[in-house]
Image (tube, grey):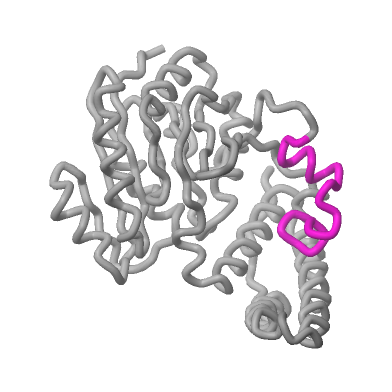
């Protein structure tokens, strides 16, 4: 198998002016950790801030591609994947900053096991222990309950413990959370990249599932870490964030178990949204919680209305 020497890093930005400079600076600082060349591509999803200007003015070596609209994460990332020339391809969020030694450790890990298609570093956050990005593929029970009121009420549900790998077995993950992923480019080329039907969320689950079906594995590089702030793009519009989360979940469920299952899941989530509304109405009775409850009511009402009325055709089940 061809040795891994060079890396192409792909960063997708959308209103990321506050994060893109330290992200790219950390990438360039890691250039000496790899034996070959480091190429960096930024795909800007029609940002309304100075994201593209910062890249153009402060990092002239970076290849900047400016989309004419917000393409969504997967479609924008696919542009970078198509342009990549490195033996490995690093896909990193703009709000994620590599720690020293992380890039070299991931490339070494990827090269040491020829059946690895993708590795990811540990996720570090200020004041918190480093967390593993490793997950198992969701069972139907996990897919239905994750991100719903059920998860909040029963966080130790066995299906969720298995999904988040909180059951004591943290080896051999089946997918990796996508803040920072280092792919073997030859493996990634077998799939054609991300399913562009996912605007945000679940696209890495779908892609790594596809790679797994082709015989590839993924793994966590435990001697590498990345600092990930999280939510830098999604927090800008919490209603859109929740809609995109569930749209992606319904797409994944449809592709895995069929559209009737996805339809039943959507009905369940819509009903649970009404229960969430009742919960917030009850909070209005407490004066100290009223402001927060009103905000939550507006957001939950918008998402719940979409759950009932925003149906669209989903893809066919995988065969």
Is the C terminus in the top left, top right, bottom left or bottom right quadrant?
top right
Residue 114 showing in the rendered view: yes
Magenta stretch holds residue 294 = no
Q: Nearer the viewer, residue 97 or 91?
A: 97
Toward which corner of the image does residue 48 lie, by quadrant? bottom left
Toward which corner of the image does residue 105 lie, by quadrant? top left
Residue 30, given in percent of the width and then of the height, sits at 29, 30
What residue lies at 27% left-to-right and 60% top-to-bottom? Answer: 51
Residue 318, given in percent of the width and then of the height, sits at 67, 46
Toward which corner of the image does residue 16 lie, by quadrant? bottom left
| 314 on left or right of 187 | right
What residue lies at 41% left-to-right and 41% top-to-bottom? Answer: 91
Q: Nearer the viewer, residue 6 or 209?
A: 6
Residue 309 showing in the rendered view: no
Magenta region: 145-166
What residue lies at 22% left-to-right and 26% top-to-bottom? Answer: 37
Residue 268, given in percent of the width and then of the height, sits at 82, 67
Is the N terminus in the top left, top right, bottom left or bottom right quadrant?
top left
Vertical order, 198 against 238 (above or below): above
Magenta stretch holds residue 155 = yes
């Amino acid at each position: 198998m061809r040795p891994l020497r060079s890396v192409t890093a792909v960063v997708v930005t959308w209103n990321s002016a506050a994060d893109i400079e330290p992200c790219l600076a950390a990438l360039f600082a890691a250039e000496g950790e790899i034996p070959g060349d480091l190429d960096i591509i930024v795909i800007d999803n029609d940002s309304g801030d100075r994201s593209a200007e910062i890249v153009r003015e402060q990092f002239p070596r970076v290849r900047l591609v400016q989309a004419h609209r917000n393409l969504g994460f997967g479609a924008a990332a696919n542009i970078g994947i198509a342009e990549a020339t490195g033996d490995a391809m690093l896909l990193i969020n703009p709000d994620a900053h590599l720690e020293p030694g992380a890039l070299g450790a991931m490339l070494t890990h990827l090269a040491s096991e020829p059946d690895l298609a993708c590795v990811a570093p540990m996720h570090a956050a200020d004041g918190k222990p480093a967390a593993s990005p490793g997950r198992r593929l969701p069972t139907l029970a996990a897919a239905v309950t994750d991100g719903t009121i059920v998860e909040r009420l029963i966080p130790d549900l066995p299906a969720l413990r298995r999904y988040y790998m909180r059951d004591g077995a943290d080896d051999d993950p089946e997918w990796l959370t996508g803040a920072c992923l280092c792919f073997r480019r030859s493996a990634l080329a077998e799939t054609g990249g991300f399913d562009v039907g996912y605007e945000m969320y679940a696209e890495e689950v779908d892609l790594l599932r596809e790679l797994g079906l082709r015989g590839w594995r993924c793994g966590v590089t435990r001697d590498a870490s990345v600092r990930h702030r999280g939510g830098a793009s999604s927090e800008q519009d919490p209603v859109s964030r929740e809609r995109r989360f569930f749209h992606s979940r319904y797409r994944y469920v449809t592709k895995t178990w069929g559209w009737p299952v996805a339809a039943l899941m959507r009905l369940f989530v819509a009903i649970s949204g009404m229960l969430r509304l009742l919960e917030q109405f009850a909070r209005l009775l407490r004066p100290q919680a009223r402001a927060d409850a009103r905000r939550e009511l507006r957001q939950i009402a918008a998402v719940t209305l979409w759950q009932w009325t925003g149906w669209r055709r989903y893809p066919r089940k995988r065969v």
